Structure formats: structure tokens, C-alpha cells
Amino acid sequence: MKPDEVFGATSVLVEKNGKGLSVDTRFSKEHAEDIVAYIKEKQITLDTLYISYSDPDFYFGTAMMKEAFPDAKVLATASTVKRIKETNEAKQAVWQETLQDNAPDRILLPELAPSALTIDSDTLQIVGSDEEKQTLYQPTDKILLGGILTAADSHLFMADTKTRESQEQWLKDLEELTTFGATRVIPSHFASDNDFSPENIAFTKEYLERFMLSEATYTTSEGIIQDMKIAYPNLPDDSLEMSAKVVTGEMDWE
């Protein structure tokens, strides 16, 4: 499905013989309604809602989708469930003004997912040695999807990865993704014309390494912003200012 218009967050519907598995539920009621309408239009029986990460644009629409499809299981990894439980109230407070009537009425905590998800006869494995940032892998068609590790078509959101240690871990996680030999990689955030190629992993890695260089070179957010705009002049810069301020300590973000 097309990414949402706020953060470009991805939601993927996996369908097999009339049964469906929805990966992530987007950021607002309006965007969740789009998923619901599409599933009903296609007359798909939704079996599972899988939340692949704990940021609000992955799960704020969950309760609304569960109301529309009450028989669907809502699942996530233990790490994702834990972080949603610990942070959802603060995240709702942060984004209430932005979302207003589109903010979630309540947050629905997922149940623990098994090590693999099934949809009819298809299997999607939950992969990645970094248990906080795992990804789905569909081995039959060699597709990687879900999770936060890959993004494309915009500056990466670095505020949640503000330490050198967490950035180096991200690079290790990306290197691990390449070992699957995926033919298609659906990133967590993208523009509507993305081709879902393995280049999405390469872009994320290249950008991250370039940002780390900029961060090591400049001590102010202004310096990082100017440098990254020169390096990537054609990318929309919605999140760049916030990322630069957080990594330099000019802005608090947890």
C-alpha cells in the first residue's frame, strides 16, 4: 500500500487465497481507515495484524483495525510489546496536537508472536539477531519487509539512534540483512515510487555512514544539517533538523 502522508510509514498487506496478514497499522485513524477500506473492498479475511516496531507510525492504528476485524490476532515480538507498553502514553502526548481527531482513542497492546507467521500455506520468518529491531523474511519469494532497519527516499530519522554505539549496531544489523540475498526489500519508510529493490539496504547503510561522518566532523546541528543537505540535495529534509539537534544534544528526545 502507499506510504502514509505524515512520515511515509509503510503498511504491507500479505494475501494468500483470500486470507490476509497486515504488517503495521500506520500513524493515524485516517490512514488505518484506508487499510480497512482496502481489505474490505478486496473481500480479504484478515487473520493477523503484526506490529513490526514500536514507533507510533507502526502501531497507532491498531485498535481501530482490531475493531474492524475483531477475529484478527494482534502480534508483535517481546521487545516491541515491551517498548509500546513503556512509551505509548508519552508518544500519545507528543503527537496529540499534530494528529488531533486522528489520534488513537486507545492503544491496544499486541500479544507475543511466535518465531514465524503463517498466512494460508505461506511462512514469514521473524529474523535478525538484534531482538530489538527484527525484520520479516518471506523465503519463497525472498522478500524482506517490516521493521525499522531500512528506509529510503528521505533523510533517515536519527533521533532514536543518537549514540555511536546504537549507530554501529544499526550497521551490523544492515549487514546481516544482506546475508539473506533478498530480491525485494520493502523499507519501513519510502516515497510512493520506490522499486523495493535490495538497493534500499545499500542506501540506508550509505546514508548512515555519511551521517556518522558528519556527526564526527561538526559539533552543531547547523553544521550537520548543511553538510547533509550538500551530500543529499534532492532528499526531503523533514526530519533532518530534529535528528541533528538530538545527536548534538541541543534537543532532548527519548
Image: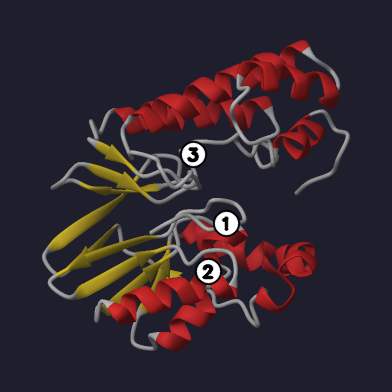
The correct choice, above or below, for 212 with respect to 38 in the image is above
Tell me if mark 1 has few (under 14), some (14-19) or many (20+) residues whose alpha carbon lies within 10 angstroms of its own.
Answer: few
Q: Which mark is residue 191?
A: none
Instruction: Please name whichever residue, 67 or 121, is drawn nearer the observer in this view of the structure.
Output: 67
Ranked by sequence position, the earlier of labels 3 and 1 is 1
Q: Secondary structure at mark 1?
A: loop
| Three-letter residue code for mark 3 | Ala
Left or right: 243 in relation to 67: right
Ranked by sequence position, the earlier of labels 3 and 2 is 2
Residue 192 appears in the rendering? yes
The correct choice, above or below, for 66 with respect to 155 in the image is below
Q: Position of residue 168 (x, y in %)?
A: 56, 25
Answer with the quarter of the image where residue 202 lies. top left
Point 38% across, 47% down: residue: 135
Q: Position of residue 182 (x, y in %)?
A: 24, 35
Answer with the quarter of the image where residue 117 lies. bottom left
Pointer 2 residue: 31
| Three-letter residue code for mark 1 | Glu
Q: Secondary structure at mark 3?
A: loop
Point 49% across, 29% down: residue: 204
Q: Which mark is residue 5?
A: 1
Instruction: Please name whichever residue, 110 or 205, is drawn nearer the observer in this view of the structure.
Output: 205
Residue 110 appears in the rendering? no
Pointer 3 residue: 151
Ranked by sequence position, the earlier of labels 2 and 1 is 1
Point 72% across, 68% down: residue: 92
**Alpha-carbon span between mark 3 and mark 2:** 19 Å
**Alpha-carbon span between mark 3 and mark 1:** 15 Å
The correct choice, above or below, for 98 with respect to 227 in the image is below
Q: Position of residue 51 (x, y in %)?
A: 45, 63
